Amino acid sequence: MTTSGLPTRVAIALGSNLGDRQAHLAYAIERLREFLTNVRVSSIHETAPEGVDEPQPDYLNAVVSGGTTLQPLALLHRLLTIERERGRTRPSLRASRTLDLDLILYGDDVINTPELTVPHPRYKDRKFVTEPLSEVW
């Protein structure tokens, strides 16, 4: 892991399919600017839910990239806090959500802990991540 004190380039996927989806994403982007530098924001993509059994509303998805001096777990905890601030609950793994923030990339680091896996294990299979990621990475 990066320990030089220099910012590490990260990519964070954003998604929302409950409530005011646009407002949830805008809130997350503003909060991310508090601890990311050189922020780049992809366009917003509207996509149908994938891998769910029950009907759900469509998602708005985007990717934000930027630099951070936060260590990976500290960054993850900030992301989880932002989700909670927008009313995110986790009744089931694939449940609809007001806001979902996934740490996709943390520099070139490979992290495999019970709490965090980076690169995100399924991001390459998700067009709703790879397309906006290609805009900002």
Image (tube, rainbow, N blue to C red):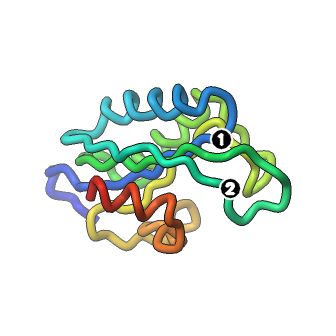
Label 2, residues with CA under 10 Å away: few <14, some 14-19, many ≥20: some
Residue sitting at x 61%, y 33%:
84
Question: What x and y, as percent, mark residue 93?
Answer: 74, 57
What residue is at 21 percent from the left and 39 percent from the top? Answer: 37
The quarter holding residue 114 reads bottom right
The amino acid marked with disc number 1 is Asn
Mark 2 element type: loop
User: Looking at the image, do the residues carrying marks 1 and 2 touch, with CB atoms under 8 Å apart?
Assistant: yes
**Picture coordinates of residue 45, whole percent (x, y):** 49, 48
Which quadrant holds the N terminus?
bottom left
Q: Amino acid at mark 2?
A: Pro
User: Residue 70, relative to residue 106: is it above or below?
Assistant: above
Indicate left or right for 108 with 7 as reference.
Answer: right
What residue is pinned by disc 1?
Answer: 17
Q: Residue at x 49, y 46 (%)?
A: 14
Dot 1: element: loop
Q: Nearer the viewer, residue 80 or 123?
A: 123
Q: Position of residue 12 (x, y in %)?
A: 41, 51
Quadrant the C terminus occupies: bottom left
Residue 103 drawn above or below residue 85: below
| 43 over 130 or under it: above or below | above
Q: Callout 1: 10 Å neighbours few (<14), some, many (20+)?
A: many
The mark nearer the N terminus, 1 or 2, is 1
Near-viewer residue (2 or 132) = 132
Q: CA distance from mark 1 to mark 2?
A: 9 Å
What mark, if any, has residue 90 been given in the picture?
none
Point out which mark residue 49 bears: 2
* Residue located at (42% from left, 69% from top): 119
